[in-house]
Amino acid sequence: MNLDLIAPPQPYSALIFDCDGTLVDTMPTHYLAWTAALRAQGADFPEDRFYKMGGMPTTEIIKVLNQEYGYTMDVEYTHHDKERRFLEMVDTVIEITAVMDIVRAHHGKIPMAVASGGTRPVVERILEATDLRKYFDAVITTDDVANGKPAPDIFLLAAERLGAKPEECIVYEDGDPGIVAAERAGIRCIDIRVLWATESVTA
């Protein structure tokens, strides 16, 4: 794995990281929770569609699924049921080493934040379960902003909390909505999926 592919380009004064699929390998676990919650209501969530929506708030995903597939799922009930199922499995998730190597290399040297499309209880629980909370000066979640990814709000707030201008920051992301959000915020973004793409080509 060529870690130079995700090394932050100079200059920068703060780093901002998405959580799910970037810091921590939670996406398969999230999909299991989604599948169980939706099947309980006779609904389905195609896996490829799930990954394309990575980073969007749970409530927004439910609304999109209702619209696209003609489901009539109650947004709040489905949201809480999915999160409950995920939290039951959260202790099985592990960190993504390549990204955490960058976090550890910068810890105590420059300010860093987590900026996640997840809700605060879930994001904080993930960071607690993986013992990663101690590395970050701020944790921003969808609960802290009016508009979730792909709106730029969450990254702009993260930069503000870190005392940095957007152009001084670098965002690490693995999802299209988050990458669009970073672009809209005027923040340089590193798509960590390049690591997996390179592995597939060289395997």
Image (spheres, grey):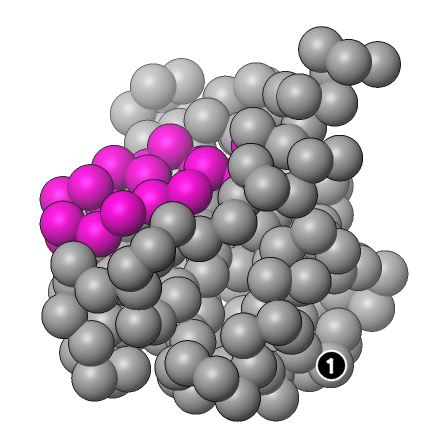
Q: Kindly identify the amino acid type of the residue bearing the numbered disc 1.
A: Asp
Residue highlighted by disc 1: 131
Q: Look at the picture and state if 187 lies above or below 128.
A: above
Question: Residue 77 appears at what percent x and percent y?
Answer: 47, 57
Question: Residue 79 appears at what percent x and percent y?
Answer: 48, 55
Residue 125 occupies quadrant: bottom right
Q: Is residue 184 left or right of residue 201?
A: left
- Seen from this angle, which residue lies furthest front? 10
Q: Residue at x 66, y 63 (%)?
A: 100
Does residue 142 appear in the picture of this structure? no
Range shown magenta: 174-193
Which image quarter holds the N terminus? top right
Q: Residue at x 48, y 84 (%)?
A: 109
In the rendered image, residue 28 lying in the magenta stretch gets the answer no
Which image quarter holds the C terminus? top right
As helix, strand or loop, the secondary structure at mark 1 comes to: loop
Question: Residue 49 appears at what percent x and percent y?
Answer: 50, 22
Q: Residue at x 67, y 28 (%)?
A: 196
Q: Residue at x 57, y 51 (%)?
A: 22
Q: Look at the picture and state if 178 lies above or below 24.
A: above
Question: Residue 37 appears at what percent x and percent y?
Answer: 64, 44
Q: Is residue 158 left or right of residue 59?
A: left
Q: Is residue 99 left or right of residue 200?
A: left
Does residue 171 appear in the picture of this structure? yes
